[in-house]
Image: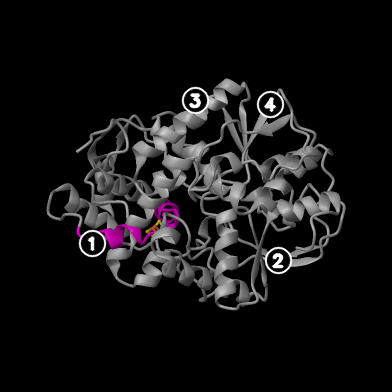
Amino acid sequence: MKQRQNLKLEDYKWDAEWCMGCRGCTWVDHIYATGIQFPNKCPSLYREKFDAYSPFGKNKISLKIMDGGLTFTPRLLDILYKCNMCGACDVGCKRNLDFDPGMVLETFRIRAVDAKAGPMPAHKAVNENIKKKNNRYGLPHGKRKAWLPKSAKVSKKPDMLYFVGCNTSYKNKEIAKATVGILDKAKVKYNLFPQEVCCGHPMYDVGCVDDALKQAKKNIAALKKSGADTIITSCAECYKTWKVDYPKMMDKRTDEMGYKVLHITQLAVEKIKDGTLKPKHKVPMRVTYHDPCNLNRRSDDWIPWHGTRGKYGCTEPIKEYRRGVSGVTTEPRLLLGLPTGIPGFPPDIPGIPGIEAKEMRRMDVNTMCCGAGGGVADAFPEFTRDTANHRMDEADDIGIETIVSACPYCIDTFNKTAKEGERPVRAVDITQILYKSLTGKGGSL
Ligand code: SF4
Ligand code: SF4
């Protein structure tokens, strides 16, 4: 069994042992609940019903793996991988306690892979595609940038690099085009990321940390060679991978990595504030906003901790906890004209004109996953479908048929599920709405 210096299940044994089964990880915190509808936030427990599938159930099972009382049976792998790695349990637990259930789940999967039991066959197929073709779909690497319009004002000496991601490069190319359109209008010196290969998120999230680390090293080497120091993403998974998982795998703090990661909505708000970007064309739409888990509660800066625990779990040095509160939730809301709870609201920037936006009951750190995360869409598509339908029921509950999000995987999941179920719901990426408002172009949304 591999024993890395970091990312060992045993590093989180204390957290799993002291989990008290209070269920704070599975329900929307009561002070944020807006009624008795939609109070749950763990897709795994909501669908599978048995405690084994809950965050606390997985904590207890991990203890039996650590002491040798259990092995990785097919049923145990079903429990471990029917989990969206959505982070709801992690921030729910940390509302009241200093535990790391999210890291128990991550290192539990790493242990399964080290034991040659995980990941699931569908994940192995995705990993092979990445290894052979540098993208999760196994499509030709040479076509990764084929969507780039000739008119894009890319710079030969860029300050920032747009890391497009596999999904956006090959499937949701309109998001990529809208993003470069926004970058052009923002008058920044940018180019596409050179020699971009998959960020490694599909590998990291299923426990294949050594494979993911190889992707990280390739991308970081390309960034260093370019001379740029800022990564722009339009994909929540790429954002989290660069910001959180690369430093985590390298056992560094995010602020020690020597680069900065911005989601395109963060740059857009900055440029609206300084007057460079002017969303002036009306986009008359009634929408709600779905927070992607990886842009939201899973994207706090990584803070390594190596120390000792004393009485009552006291730590030396003091451990800093990542409570899921510094992800990107404010900027998309500012663009859509939604309340943000930050000082100065009504917003100090003009949102996109014509948009009428309404929050779903579960939002921000209490959001419900779209159902695709954690490799679930690849290995258990019927589970993804059920969770996406449940989230769309929530949009129905507030009378909204258009879901805006900021991640191509969430967009795909809602649109595919809506089509299969012949539901009138559709999902649109926030970049497309912003681009349309800035330029009047972008077709009908
Ligand atoms: S993971 Fe945290 S919130 Fe959930 S049952 Fe355990 S102690 Fe309670
Ligand atoms: S990561 Fe999400 S799906 Fe997995 S146990 Fe936690 S709340 Fe449930």
Q: Helix, strand, or loop for circle 3?
A: helix
Q: Which residue is mark 2?
A: 287
Earlier-in-chain disc, 4 versus 1: 1
View extreme (left): residue? 69
Callout in the foreground (2, 4): 4
Q: Residues within 10 Å of mark 1 (few under 14, many from 20)?
A: few
The quarter of the displayed image where residue 410 is located: bottom right
Q: Which residue is mark 3?
A: 256
Q: Relative to the observer, which residue lies in front, 88 or 114?
A: 114
Q: Which residue is mark 4?
A: 159
Q: For marks 3 and 4, give the CA distance.
A: 19 Å
Q: Is residue 128 left or right of residue 331?
A: left
- Do residues under tags 2 and 4 come within 8 Å of each other at their CB atoms? no
Q: Amino acid at mark 2?
A: Val
Q: From this viewpoint, is residue 70 visible?
A: yes
Q: Relative to the observer, which residue lies in front, 369 or 72?
A: 72
